[in-house]
Amino acid sequence: MRRTAYRVVQEGLTNTRKHAPGAKVAVTVTGSPGRELVIVVSNVLPIGRAASEIPGAGAGLAGLAERVHLDGGRLRHGPSRGRFQLTAVLPWPVDQPAGAAGEHGREVP
């Protein structure tokens, strides 16, 4: 689960840089053992279309969705209220080490 959580944040930040350069990004991680780990990466939608300078195959979200699914989770992404939002919900087993994620959400502006 830890690697998948890391990859969700990494992909969200990469996509923001690629498709909305200079946009502020909000990353929120919440959850607790025995429940779920919820990761949300969002940014304001760019006006017009941003020219991407970062090369890639364009399969990042598809690969991420597969990875999240293999860990028993769910992934949603797309526009919502003027923002692009990437949301992953992963199971967090009770026996998962406490250092895997914080119990309380923390938003980084």
Image (cartoon, helix red, strand yellow):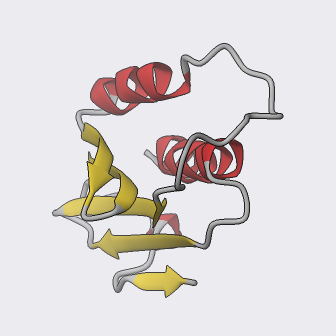
Residue most extreme to the left: 35
8 or 1: nearer the eye? Answer: 8
User: Is 80 left, or right, of 68 in this rendering?
Assistant: left
Q: Where is residue 57 drawn, in percent x and y?
A: 67, 13
Work out whether 66 lies above or below 11. above
Left or right of residue 73, residue 19 in this image: right
Q: Is residue 62 placed above or below 14 in the rendered structure? A: above
User: Where residue 60 sits in the image (x, y, percent)?
Assistant: 55, 25
Would residue 6 be visible to someone looking at this image? yes
Q: How many marks can you see?
A: 0
What residue is drawn where x is 72% and y is 36%?
A: 51
Residue at (58%, 42%) from the top-left corner?
11
Q: In this view, does 33 lie above or below 103?
A: above
Residue 20 x/y as whole percent: 62, 52
Say whether residue 66 is left or right of residue 22: left
Q: Can residue 92 be seen in this view?
A: no
Q: Nearer the viewer, residue 54 or 95?
A: 54
Which residue appears at 46% of the width and 57% of the height? Answer: 45
On-image quarter of the N terminus: top left
Quadrant showing the C terminus: bottom right
* Position of residue 7 measured from the top left corner of the image (x, y, whole percent): 57, 42
Horizontal side of residue 60 vs 55, given as left or right:
left
**The quadrant where residue 105 appears:** bottom left
Residue 13 position (above or below residue 68): below
